[in-house]
Image (spheres, rainbow, N blue to C red):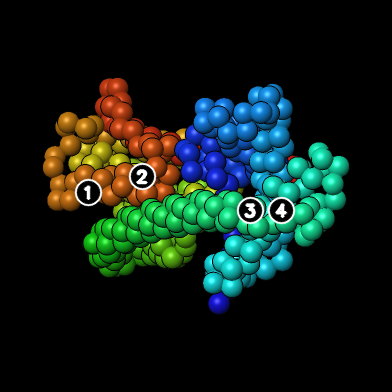
Amino acid sequence: MPTHPVRANHPLDMFALFRRWPASTRRNLVYTALWSSLIGIALTVLFALTGARSAVPIPKLLGMTLLTSNTIGFLIHGGLALLRRAFPAAAARRSWAMRACQVLLIESCAVLGFTVPDALLRGVNPFRALLIEGALAPILPMGLVVTAITMAILATNERRLARETAAAQHQQQIAEAAQLLAEARLRTLQAQIEPHFLYNTLANVVSLIGSEPDRARHMLERLIDFLRASLAASRAEQATLGAELDLAAAYLDLLAVRMGPRLRWRIEADEGCRDMKIAPMLIQPLVENAVMHGIEPKVEGGEILVRAACAAGILSVEVSDDGMGLGAAPPRSGGGVGLSNLRERLRSLHGPKAQLQLLENQPSGVTSRLLLPLPPPRPLDQA
């Protein structure tokens, strides 16, 4: 079972304010100095209020407590960091052996932190102070107190990190489930629409075989092109804008054979945009909507214009028609379902950054505008 790197936490991470600075070696060193100094100041205030060590002037007492608390703090900081680096697998599992090592390490650091600064200030060998002068006995209980407090803080931060990790994983699962649901709805909609489109097209081909065989053959060729492109798009997780525009062109070309002069269409796209990566089947529903609700109900037909442009970090795709318009088109079965599903799919893919706008054209028709955020440019060293 693979192990994951341990996220080192710091006592100040208990407070949300200090979690704003992302964890790093430099940050943790600064936090250790701050945390240790705060403890030293608190102990100085406590000694001053209780009268303990009243014979020592307050400035000297403050200096001694700051030196002692920072020595203990940095010894513990460095010792735990070395322990995590030496035994990463045990640290990731948080085994009892690792807990025991942490306790022994913190106790040792606390004993050294209490003894070494005092002995050095008095000009005494620290080991002599511990072993001969008998300083070890009264220091051990204080070290145990430091160990208990430190272990409690470590355990509290580990539980907080575990909760945050579980919450992040839960949110990711929800987002993935929402995306899968949107994709499933898109596939369901395609499964409902494509058979009718296929049946109608084949019926037109059959009706043209006897009277206009060349036109029937052309229509069948366009149908094959469209089905090939549609099948590839429906199976892909990602497509390019150029591929999506080619799919729309195959669809419109096929319908132009069936509808004759009642349908005219154009596709205009900036050359620099055609290689942009987008989710598949985002443009096709807009084109189908323009045909079904705009051009087909209009006796004289009309024109569909598909335009794509990139500017200011946004990919804009517009599908415009001069058909019946938003209010004049007669209601159809399933009307609005495709656009509703498309909006849900956009939310699952891009969140609020993507938009689908419907604009009324003058004198008639509708423009469906799809706005997608472009990915940030890669650094030059990654290009």
Q: Is residue 250 visible?
A: no
Residue 206 in the image, given as x and y percentages of width and height: 27, 68
| Residue assigned mark 1 | 337
Query: Is 309 or 246 nearer to us in this picture?
Result: 309
Under circle 1, the secondary element is helix
Q: Earlier in the sequence, mark 1 or mark 4?
A: 4
Q: Which residue is mark 3?
A: 138
Q: Is residue 337 left or right of residue 21?
A: left
Label 1 or label 4, whichever lies nearer to me, is 4
Residue at left offset 68%, top offset 24%? 57
Residue marked by disc 4: 135
Residue 62 at what x, y percent from top left?
67, 29
Mark 3–mark 4 distance (CA, rounded to whole Å): 6 Å
Q: Residues within 10 Å of mark 3 (few under 14, many from 20)?
A: few
Where 160 sits versus 236, above or below?
Answer: above
Q: Amino acid at mark 4?
A: Ala
Task: Give the percent coordinates (x, y) of residue 42.
Answer: 56, 32
Q: Residues within 10 Å of mark 1 (few under 14, many from 20)?
A: few
Q: Foreground: 266 or 333?
A: 333
Three-letter code, disc 1: Val
Task: Give me the C-alpha separation between circle 1 and circle 2.
Answer: 16 Å
First in sequence, mark 3 or 2: give its number.
Answer: 3
Please tell me whether mark 2 sits on a helix, a strand or a loop. Answer: helix
- Is the residue marked by circle 2 packed among few (<14), some (14-19), or many (20+) residues within 10 Å? some
Q: CA distance from mark 3 to mark 1?
A: 78 Å
Q: Give me the residue at 71% from left, 34% from top.
A: 64
Mark 3 to mark 2: distance in Å? 64 Å
